[in-house]
Structure formats: C-alpha cells, structure tokens
Amino acid sequence: MKRTFVAGLLSTLLLWPLGAQIQNQPDDGQWPMAAKNYASTRYSTLGQINTSNVASLKLAWTFSTGLTHGHEAAPLIVNNTMYIVTPFPNYLYALDLTKPGAPMRWVYQPDPEPSSQGVACCDTVNRGGAYWNGKIIYNTLDVQTVAVDANTGKEIWRTKLGDINLGESITMAPVVAKGVVLVGNSGGEFGVRGWLAGLDAESGKIKWRAYATGPDKDVLIDANFKPFYSKDRGTDLGVKTWPGETWKIGGAAAWSWISYDPTLDLFYYGTSNPGPWNPEQRPGDNKWSSTLFARRPETGEAIWAYQISPHDMHDYDAVNENILLDLTINGQPRKVLAHPDRNGYLYIIDRATGEVISAQTFGYVNTSEGVDVKTGLIKWNPTKQTGYNTVRDACPAPPGVKDWTPSAFSPKTGLIYIPHNNLCYESQATQANYISGTPFVGMTVRMYAGPGGNRGVFSAWDPVQAKTVWSVNELFPVWSGALATAGDVVFYGTMDGWFKAVDARNGRELWKFKTGSGIIGQPATYKGPDGKQYVAVLSGVGGWSGAIVSGGLNAVDGTGALGFVNAMSDLGKYTTKGGMLYVFSLP
Amino acid sequence: MPYLKCRNALCIACLLLAACQRQHRDIRPSPTRLAIYGDAAKEDALRPGGRVNSQPVVNNPYNASAYDISEGQRLYNWYNCSGCHFNGGGGIGPPLIKKHWIYGGEPANLFDTIVKGRPNGMPAWGGRIPEYQVWQIVAYVRSMNGEQPRSATAARLDTIQTNPQTIVNRTTGPTK
C-alpha cells in the first residue's frame, strides 16, 4: 500500500490502496467536503439505514438558519461537529453533535458587502465549504475566500479574489487538493472574465490564477497541454475564437464543482456559458467557455481541455460535476469521469487524456443531434439556433437537462443518480450593452415544461451501458443534490418540500418527509457520536428555479429570472421560503 | 392633473385633449442635476406625536408623454435595468410591477432609488444616467404599474411575445 504525502494531511481524507478503484473511496463516516470525497461520489458506506428499515426514519432534530434565500449548501460533518454555510450573508454555524439536539457551538459572520446581492445571477446561494487541516474554508458572495478555525470559529485568513463592480461573485464550494484551495468565480451573466484560482490553504495566499479566456499564458496553457481533439489545439485560442477584445468580457466562469484524482494528480472542472447569451455578438467557438479542464493543483497548469459546447447558444455551461470512476468499458479498464452536462449528454471521458468514450442523452434534447466521439464535436440543430429571430420549443432550456444539482454514484449498484430537469424554452436575442457590474445577457427567454409536462426527473444511469435504468418524474425541476448509501437507499429533495428515500435498484419510493420549504440543498449522511447513522439536509427554496418564491417575483412577467419564472409560476402554491436544517435517524 | 411643461400654443391647445399625452415632447431637457430631493425613500407611516407627512410632493416633469415613456422603456433596456428586473417581474432585483415598494413608488422615490442606488444590490446610477433620462425611466416604471395615463402607455413590450399559435401547452410541453 503506497501512501502519497499530502501537505496538512487530515484524518478524514484517508488514502486508498494503489490499484483500488477510485470510486471505492475511504470513508470514516464523516462528510468533510460538499461532494463527500475527491471522486465526488456522494456515496456513504454507512448502511444502518437500509431498504428494509428506512420506512421508519424519524426526525431527530432541526436547526433554523433564520434566512429566506435559497439554501443550496451541503452540511459538513467533522469531529462530531456539523458546519452549515448559509446563503448571503454567508454565516457559518457550528453545531455540537455530542449534545442532545445539537446546540450551536458558535457562529462566524464574515460580513460580506450587501451590494454583492446585486451581482448574484440566480439567488444569493452558497454551495458549502471544505474541511482542511483544522479549518473550514468557504467563499463569500462578495468574492472572498475565508478560512475559519474549525474548533473556535475564529477567522484564520481571508483573501479577496475579485470585484463585484466587474460583476464577479462566488457561490461555489471550494475543494482543497495538495494543500491548495481551488476557487472559481461566478458571473457568466455579468460579462466577467472567468477564472479559477489556487490559494495556499495555510496562508490564503494566491499561488496561481487560470483564466478561461485570453492568451495561453493567462489560461496557464504551456507545452504540457495536450487536448485530445484537434479542434481544441492551437495557440491563444482564448483570444482567436472571439471577435476583437470580447474575450475580456466573455464569461466562462468556474462557478461549480471540482473533482481530484490524486494518482494522476489532476483536478477537473468545467467553465460556464460565454457572455453575452446573445450568440450574434460573439461569432466563433468562444474558447474556453463551456469547456472541461484538467489541471495540476500545485501550478494550475492545464493538461487537457475539451470544449463541450463550442459557440454555446443556449446557456449550456459545462460546470456540472465530474464523478471519477474506474470502469471496464468494452472489455477495457478505463479511468473515466462521468459528466452529465447541461446540453443533455452524459459524457464518459477518459480522465487521463480527455477522449470522449460515450456521450448519450439522459433527457429530451432537440437543440443538437448527437456528439461525434471521433472529432469531439456536438452537432447543433440549425433550426434551434438562437439569435435575433424568435426560436420556439428548444429543448433543453438554459438550465439544461441538468443544472448544478450534483449526482451521486453507488459502487454497489454501479449507477449514477441524477437530479435533473425537463424544460424547453422560447427565446429572442436583443443587443446586450456591456456596463460593468450589471447583467450582460441580451436574450429574452421563457421556459416551460418539456414533453410529458413534468418539470423534473430523478433518474439512475448506467455509465457502462450509457443508458437510463429507471427514472421518477417530479412536478418541479429536481434542484437538490443526490445522496447514495451502502444501505441501497438514495436520497433527494423536491422543490415542493419532500425529502425522499428511494430504492437504489429500482427507484421505488421507500419513505418521504415534508419539510417546511422546498429543498434545493445537498443531503449528507454521517455516523453520530452515538454510533447511529444520521441523514441531514437543508430545506429552504430559492436558487434560479426557486427565485420566484425566495425573491417574491411577479409571475405576470414570464421573462423574470432569465425566463425561469414562466415555468415556475405555480411554485408559490406549493411552498414558502425559509431555511431550516433537518436531521433524521432511525428510532 | 399631472404637471406638464408647455412651451408653445400647440401644447397648450392639446392640453385639452387626452391625445396631447401622445404628442408632448420635451425639446430642451434639463441639465444633469442629480439627487436634488434629499433622501427620498418612502417616509415611514409611524409618526410620533401625530406629525404629518413632511415629504414634499415632487412631480415627474416627464410625467405624461408617450414619447417619454417609450424613451424610458428603451433606456430601461439600454442601461440593463431589464437585466436585473426583467420586464417588471424581477429576478436579481425585486419586481417593479407591484403594490408594496420597499423604498416607495412615488416619482421622487423612484428617482432617488435610481440615482443613489439601494444597499442590497441596486446600483447607484447618479452621474451615469442624465437626469432627464432618469425621469423618463421613472415614467416607464410607473407605467408598468398603470400609474401613467393609458393613452400614453405602450400597448406591448418590445420583447418576444407569446404566440398562442405555436406555443406549446404549458402543462404537457411539446410532443416529441
């Protein structure tokens, strides 16, 4: 058993034996980062709660955050303490799991600039923190990263990474790899120049910053950069694939998930849509928007990139999670990442090289007609191309077949559990006027339910066969994360407030509980100090899909919230806002 | 009756007619003179000792012309108000079609909201948008709420319209 040295090694990030499959991550019953582990499986080996007893799952305790915007974060559980990061103003609560009812140990208030709420495209959400070497590290809406002593709640460092007056904000959960905190900006709707930065976890000092547009030296592309497809090769493509200097305000923000493979020493993440949405203002491929990158954590240098949606016309960010899996495909052992993209394809990609092994749709798609794995090119449907002409019945809508809502993978069933959408839209472009600090979109949108009328789906996908195994329709987009467990129970939440447990093998509903507000948070599970398995989730509707309720929007204008209001006008009949943590256990 | 600037006989004559509101056009906009009304957020209704409202009534000098409202609509899009408030339903910012204003819906309140911004993310536009344009935007925002004479208000938005012929069923979606 080989042990790799990791600076500031912590007890919860155990190492696994060489040769073991990456999806079989070590698990000590805690939940140290939003995605549970570097492979982003969101799978727990805890099996106390299982298919035969989950029906008797009961509420153990609750905790109110006192806030009413969308609660998208995953609770962290480390050393018998639960940590909750809230939406703006980004409080960090520490709850003592050793005492009955888990009373608050402390609260840390970073005091972000209130004006930053004006540059949050899709509600003032935050997706959580990461535990590293005695610290909780997370981001604030006003573009800062903070490190807080996990024991005392005292601030250890804070680093300002950007400027709200350039339309920048941060909503993502950072990941710490090799002592480097990986953080990216949000603002694909504000004409930002997207970046991902690496910070020293002990001091907060910025070690490197990799832009997603501009010359190669800014993108940290050098001689070691080997994209698999010829379409992604060439010098300074981050400049040449844009008209004039528009790459400087071209979006491509890294606002979402990061995975890390310690053996290959590569981390993976995607970039957002290009700005503005109006594609007529930016002819060209618009690199490196809607792109997957593989980089080295210590230097940030790019090893490969694959532009998933060149010249995106539908807001198809490539930021969704990358689940790292070692699979046998067509008789060959392959080190892959599974990436369910906004554009509707679930990509299985060789994570060492960037080669697409398969790309099949996991929902209804008519904006494209397939992905050629030989060239890596997606075949866009010319009749659904957006622009100054009105385009109707384009599917999927801008939030995609799936948005940021992270999937889970169970090594027991071999399936990926995907919370997602079924939405189509109509659109018309308008000339976008760049005024820094304000939206840069240029598209009027109205969304509505896709075929069948259900706006959400929760489905199980076989990454080897590249097909859906089962799916459950939901009234509203499924905007929560998924959680898979060794008890063969999979958890997710719905926007009308149900927290559900389904059978991992067939999707059969085994248990549900109605929480106070719609659920868009990421469920987590842990072993309590009493040896019992607990399941925790934040309830508190909001986010892009729930802005109509959390922001009190007026449904008479279907174009509200970038056109999501049109599809969600009835949400207020099903749920009200309000953030509350719910924790469940067997009696 | 709304305050109107009348500089010529035609205008005075058409004051008698509702159609005047569609004709009026201010040919000499006032110079930039921003935030002149003090802090014109809505006054609180709770007044210790029974004092009366002390907020001066300030009328929009661009209150009633179809030209100003349609200019206001163009500027509302040009300055990206629409990026945050969309066509009045809201998104990043709160809705602007509503009864209950946080900072007040009177012309002076709206003027100050736009010029000074508001703390939770409403940008301060003072120095960026000329005063007469701010008033035109105020007129447009008021028109969204039916607070302007109907005869002066645009019948439709400049954006994509729902087409009942081709639009798919809202509950069943398009057929595959």
Image (spheres, rainbow, N blue to C red):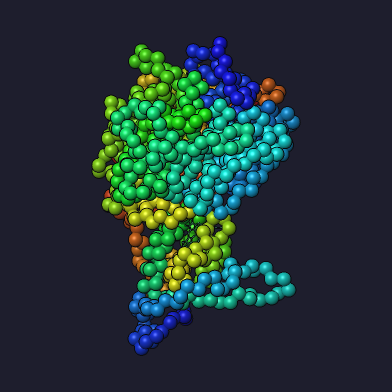
Residue A73 in sight: no
Residue at image position (68%, 40%) is: A155
Left or right, residue A137 beside residue B139? right
Q: Is residue A247 above or below residue A488?
A: below
In terms of depth relative to the viewer, which is nearer, A499 or A36? Answer: A36
Q: Is residue A265 above or below residue A333?
A: below
| Residue B19 in the image: above or below residue A286 | below
Outermost residue toward the bottom in this view: B9
Residue at the extreme left of the image, as rendered: A382
Give the quarter of the image for residue A49. top right
Viewer-closest of B167 and A4: A4
Exactly how many numbered labels are in the figure? 0
Residue A253 percent across, percent down from the top left: 45, 41
Residue B57: x and y, percent?
A: 56, 77
Q: Quadrant of the N terminus of chain A?
A: top right
Q: Is residue A90 visible?
A: yes
Q: Residue visible at 61% across and 48% down?
A: A112
In the image, residue A241 lies at what x, y percent?
Answer: 32, 42
Q: Is residue A367 left or right of residue A50?
A: left
In this view, A330 is above or below A162: above
Residue closest to the eye, A31 or A496: A31
Q: Is residue A556 left or right of residue A13?
A: left
Give percent across and percent down for residue A215: 39, 40
The structure residue drawn at horizontal position 34% and vertical position 78%, both measured from the top left corner, is B23
Quadrant of the image containing the C terminus of chain A: top right
Residue at image x 59%, y 69%? B39
